[in-house]
Image (spheres, helix red, strand yellow):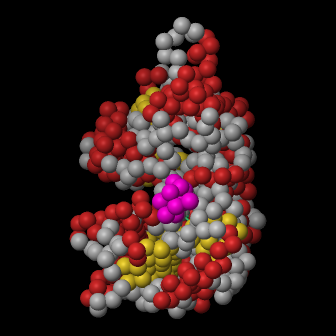
């Protein structure tokens, strides 16, 4: 077992786990450790004059590992001249030059930047003739064993539990073969293919046995949309419906997780069940919230036996069940406020925000032009109506999410309405009419960005802030013209720092989504955190509180909520209307994930669901609630 990972915790704490697993705060930090392990192995083999055989994965999970390996190659002279690589899989059919091919993926993320010998690279050939596939797959297997077998296999995990493209139902002894892709897997790939209908239904993948035979296996999982399948693979029974669970039988496998991907593991979700809980106020609140849900009771109805019968007797050593209930009740009760900017002339004890200054400067950061109203439209509306100076900063242009037909519509309207207009744009109109793919054309992307700007202004005018309080940062990392974004640079940081320094806010609201670690929300959040870190010693920052909201997909666990802003049915309708101004994001939304509800429906469902949770634990009956967690810097 490698020694580069921190200890996974005591045996007690991990006693539900059947695979060695390590949890890191951030995927960035974890990726560096994984890259280090690979680099150490390459160097060790070099010293022994041997080849190092790597099994490689594609997808979003290994990108930071590849970035780090490239950095080590450039800065530390790490050579890949003794590396032989075998990729796990490739879509079928797939041409090698296709932008969606794994051949292309590996080139842009790794192979084009290191000194690996071309003849040492092996990726299943998606362009092979159908009748030659079986023979081809057997030769792939043979090539792996002829090279001495895989020394180190890097893996991601699909939400179906797949490793490689070994979908549920895969056999423990399967080898390289053609497989049918699960609907969920294809849906997850729809972004890269601009629509699920374009995602191939089949792929060539190494088998479970091929992976099992690797001397060392490291599986990485980031983000909370992997947490459920990760816990099933690690703690559940070995089950062909969760192919990653087969790794329980591997002698040298490690799961490397970030905090969000580990959320469903027993030691994280319900650590009291391991007998190793480090009780603090946060964990106590988590336990009581869990107990309410488990027993289906409101908090003031929990009894001593409820605590005893559900592994929580430890809590009773310090306090009575009555006091525990009351502590939790007060905590949640105090998070509720109709005054998100603080209630003027009131006592600050028992309220989530300070009353002073009574008129605050508020800066709402919105990753895309619409997250502000989708995620916190009700709170935004209240802040404005309660007289605060509210600014909105749209961090990216969001231009990729405007369909060709929407851009076309605006161009055609201009052409028909202003027949003498010099800018006829006939060429663009032709381009847009004849393409179903995202067009990487500067003019088209500019028009798309302008459409989103104007939609945003319609919404912010409806809520009632002047246009001068609306800022469009157009962060450069996003402006690639395609779906794949570039790595943020100092320029992204500079633009973000400048706007904060200019407004000198008392409150900052930001999207705290961690579900997709490589998604735009997370990148924007990281840039914002860096900006806050840079500015934190400025005098105005001493009086600035940061509140994190969550996007359309995901809610804060109830015990983590520091501020809950209830909405009346009328306010829900106003929020809905503000969202409707983002017309290009209605009906046929382009990047929706696997949830086909429109954004306004999702957010209303979510705001209603959390209101119900508040009611279920014994709070007042609100029709909807928006929630925030305070970020302490
Ligand atoms: C990729 C592969 C897949 C991915 C998995 C996770 O070569 O074989 O098993 O590792 O689908 O994908 P991401 O990392 O994009 O979440």
| Main SS of residues in magenta | loop
The one nearer the camera, 451 or 165, is 165
Q: Where is residue 585 in the image (x, y as percent from the top left)?
A: 63, 36
Q: In this view, does 41 lie above or below 535?
A: below
Answer left or right for 613 relative to 231: right
**Residue at left offset 31%, top offset 43%:** 491
- In the displayed structure image, the side of residue 407 where residue 52 appears, left or right: left
The quadrant of the picture occupied by the N terminus is bottom left
Is any part of residue 552 visible from this angle?
A: no
Residue 177 inside the magenta-drawn segment: no
Residue 318: image location, x then y, percent: 54, 76
Residue 54 makes an appearance in the image: yes
- Residue at left 66%, top 52%? 198
Ligand 1: quadrant of the figure: bottom right
Farthest top residue in view: 420
Q: What stretch is highlighted in magenta?
A: 95-104
């Amino acid at each position: 077992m490698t020694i580069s990972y921190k200890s996974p915790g005591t045996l007690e704490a991990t006693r539900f786990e059947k695979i060695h697993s390590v949890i890191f705060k951030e995927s960035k930090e974890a990726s560096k450790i994984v890259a280090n392990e690979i680099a150490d192995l390459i160097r060790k083999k070099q010293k022994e004059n041997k080849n190092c055989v790597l099994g490689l994965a594609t997808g979003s999970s290994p990108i930071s590992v590849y970035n780090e390996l490239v950095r080590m190659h450039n800065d530390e002279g790490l050579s890949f001249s003794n590396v032989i690589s075998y990729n796990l899989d490739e879509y079928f059919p797939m041409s090698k030059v296709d932008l969606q091919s794994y051949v292309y993926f590996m080139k842009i993320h790794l192979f084009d930047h290191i000194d690996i010998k071309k003849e040492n690279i092996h990726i299943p050939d998606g362009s092979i003739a159908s009748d030659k596939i079986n023979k081809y797959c057997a030769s792939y297997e043979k090539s792996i064993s002829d090279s001495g077998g895989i020394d180190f296999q890097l893996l991601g995990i699909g939400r179906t539990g797949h490793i490689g493209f070994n979908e549920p139902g895969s056999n423990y002894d399967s080898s390289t073969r053609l497989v049918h892709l699960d609907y969920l897997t294809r849906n997850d790939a729809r972004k890269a293919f601009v629509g699920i209908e374009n995602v191939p239904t089949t792929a060539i993948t190494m088998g479970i046995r091929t992976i099992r035979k690797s001397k060392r296996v490291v599986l990485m999982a980031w983000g909370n949309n992997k947490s459920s399948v990760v816990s099933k693979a690690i703690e559940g029974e070995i089950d062909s419906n969760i192919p990653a669970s087969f790794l329980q039988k591997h002698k040298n496998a490690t799961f490397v997780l970030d905090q969000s991907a580990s959320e469903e593991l027993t030691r994280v979700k319900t650590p009291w069940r391991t007998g190793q809980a480090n009780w603090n106020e946060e964990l106590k609140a988590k336990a009581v919230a869990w107990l309410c849900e488990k027993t289906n009771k409101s908090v003031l109805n929990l009894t001593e036996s409820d605590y005893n019968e559900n592994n929580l007797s430890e809590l009773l050593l310090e306090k009575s069940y009555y006091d525990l209930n009351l502590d939790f009740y007060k905590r949640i009760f105090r998070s509720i406020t109709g005054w998100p900017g603080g209630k003027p002339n009131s006592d600050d004890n028992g309220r989530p925000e300070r009353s002073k200054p009574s008129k605050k400067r508020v800066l709402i950061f919105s990753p895309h032009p619409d997250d502000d109203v989708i995620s916190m439209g009700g709170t935004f509306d209240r802040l404005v109506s309660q007289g605060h100076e509210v600014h909105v900063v749209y961090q990216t242009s969001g231009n990729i999410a405007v369909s060709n037909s929407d851009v076309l519509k605006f161009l055609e309207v201009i052409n028909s309405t202003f027949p003498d207009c010099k800018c006829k744009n006939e060429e663009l109109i032709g381009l847009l009419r004849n393409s179903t793919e995202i067009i990487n054309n500067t003019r088209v992307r500019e028009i798309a960005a302008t459409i989103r700007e104007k939609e945003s202004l319609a919404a912010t005018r409806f809520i009632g802030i002047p246009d001068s309080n609306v800022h469009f940062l157009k962060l450069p990392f996003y402006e690639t013209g395609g779906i794949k974004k570039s790595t943020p640079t100092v320029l992204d940081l500079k633009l973000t720092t400048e706007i904060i320094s200019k407004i000198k806010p008392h409150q900052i609201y930001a999207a705290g989504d961690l579900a997709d670690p490589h998604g735009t929300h997370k990148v924007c959040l990281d840039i914002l955190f860096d900006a806050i870190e840079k500015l934190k010693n400025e005098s105005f920052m001493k009086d600035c509180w940061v509140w994190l909201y969550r996007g359309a997909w995901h809610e804060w666990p109830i015990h983590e909520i520091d501020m809950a802003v209830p909405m009346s049915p009328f306010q829900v309708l106003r929020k809905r209307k503000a969202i409707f101004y983002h017309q290009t994001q209605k009906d046929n939304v382009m990047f929706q994930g696997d949830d086909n509800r429109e954004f306004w429906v999702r957010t209303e469902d979510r705001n209603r669901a959390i209101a119900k949770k508040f009611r279920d634990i014994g709070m007042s009956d609100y029709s909807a609630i928006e929630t925030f967690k305070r970020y302490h810097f």
